[in-house]
């Protein structure tokens, strides 16, 4: 792990070290390395570009699909809820979830009903579109919208927190629980690096400023295929 990384010259794009611990994504593609860098370095590695929402439709990202196990009757949303449950729910026919308990880290709330949860795209679909996904194939957008190979890509949180966030980036919205700021920034930047998404000038400026409060925070990501 690299901490407190400093840049020697503007020509340096990114300094990374392979992180060898196995992940679900590596199980599918062992040739893809996992990188760990400081949050500050990760922010500096984001390519900068103006955003455009021209042509965006939420239906451009097929979700939720049949998930990682198409034969279990559970879609991606349900699989994420099952995976992230602190106390597992009962899985009824048709993958209806009964009971269970979840921790919504954005707003530090316990949730005891699957219906009260949203599965949030760490980088919202509209923001992804603005940041480069408009140029992707439909298949890549579907892979993005249902990405369970990186734990930070999809997160179960309270519906209220998710709808407050909507499609805002960190220049416009941050979790109301201040103690999770560094985690949130790390997961946001890691998701953008994983999918090679850009940041606009205002977003990058905010990320750079906010990262100063997280000097020991690292970003771990694996580039998506």
Image (cartoon, rainbow, N blue to C red):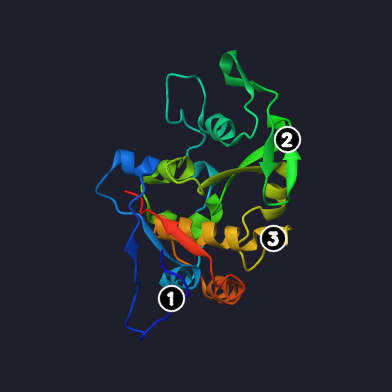
Q: Which residue is mark 3?
A: 179
The residue closer to the viewer here, 141 or 44, is 44
Give the residue displayed 49% in from the left and 55% down from the top: 128
Give residue 88's position: percent from left, percent from top: 62, 27
Give residue 48's position: percent from left, percent from top: 44, 72
Alpha carbon distance from label 3 to label 2 = 23 Å
Considering only order in the chain, which callout, 2 or 3, is on the residue closer to the N terminus?
2
Side of 46 relative to 57 (left or right): left
Name the quadrant of the N terminus: bottom left
Give the residue displayed 51% in from the left and 49% down from the top: 152
- How many residues crowd mark 1 within 10 Å: few (<14), some (14–19), many (20+)? some
Q: Which residue is mark 1?
A: 5
Which label belongs to residue 116?
2
Whether residue 3 is visible: yes
Considering only order in the chain, which callout, 1 or 3, is on the residue closer to the N terminus?
1
Q: Are marks 3 and 2 in contact (CB under 8 Å)?
A: no
- Secondary structure found at label 2: helix
């Amino acid at each position: 792990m690299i901490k407190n990384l400093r840049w020697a010259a503007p020509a340096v794009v990114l300094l990374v070290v392979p992180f060898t611990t196995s992940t679900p994504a590596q199980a599918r593609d062992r040739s893809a390395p996992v990188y760990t860098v400081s949050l500050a370095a990760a922010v500096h590695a984001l390519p900068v570009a103006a955003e455009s929402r021209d042509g965006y439709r939420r239906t451009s990202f097929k979700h939720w699909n049949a998930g990682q196990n198409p034969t279990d009757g559970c879609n991606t949303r349900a699989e994420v809820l099952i995976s992230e449950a602190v106390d597992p729910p009962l899985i009824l026919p048709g993958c209806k979830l009964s009971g269970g308990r979840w921790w919504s880290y954005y707003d530090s709330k316990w949730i005891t009903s699957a219906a009260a949860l949203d599965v949030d795209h760490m980088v919202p679909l509209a923001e992804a579109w603005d940041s480069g996904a408009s140029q992707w194939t439909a298949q890549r957008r579907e892979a993005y919208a249902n990405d369970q190979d990186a734990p930070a890509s999809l997160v179960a949180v309270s519906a209220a927190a998710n709808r407050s966030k909507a499609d805002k980036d960190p220049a416009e919205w941050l979790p109301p629980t201040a103690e999770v700021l560094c985690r949130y920034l790390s997961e946001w930047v890691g998701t953008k690096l994983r999918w090679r998404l850009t940041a606009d000038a205002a977003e990058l400026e905010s990320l750079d400023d906010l990262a100063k409060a997280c000097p020991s925070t690292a970003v771990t990501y694996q580039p998506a295929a």
